[in-house]
Amino acid sequence: MKKIVLLAGLVAVLCCITLMADAQCAMCGTTVNTSAGEGGKSTAGLNTAILYMLAIPYLAFMGIGILWYKKYRRKQIVMQMEENKISLN
């Protein structure tokens, strides 16, 4: 039980830590900075592209989950069997 509480606490602490990440290539960063300063529309396009890239994996996993659920869910089957006794001798 102590291991589970310790692991949950560690996960909670790691989720609260934020780090600055510069995950843009130099070309994209330069384009966005100059476009934003001049009032261009490329920043909105870049943000839309990022949202699409974030949404596609979630939609794919959701689709796989729905297919898996539909394929393997338990079906409610009522079996009608007669109560006749069978002699095997």
Image: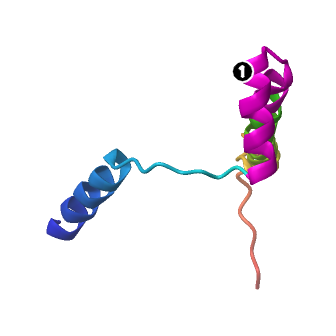
What residue is drawn where x is 21% and y is 70%?
3
Q: Nearer the viewer, residue 23 or 12?
A: 23
Residue 78 picture location, percent across and down: 74, 41
Q: Residue furthest left?
A: 2
Q: Amino acid at mark 1?
A: Gly
Residue 38 placement (x, y as % from top left): 78, 18
Residue 42 visible in the picture = yes
Front in this rendered view, residue 29 or 58: 29
Pointer 1 residue: 37
Would you say 24 lies left or right of 44 here? left
Horizontal side of 42 relative to 14 (left or right) equals right
Quadrant where the C terminus is found in the figure: bottom right
* 79 in magenta: no
Instruction: Give x and y (percent) for residue 80.
Output: 77, 44
- By secondary structure, the bulk of the magenta-drawn segment is best described as helix
Residue for point 20% across, 64% down: 6
Quarter the N terminus occupies: bottom left
For label 1, the SS is: helix
Relative to residue 30, is residue 36 depicted above or below? above
Q: Which residues are magenta?
A: 25-47
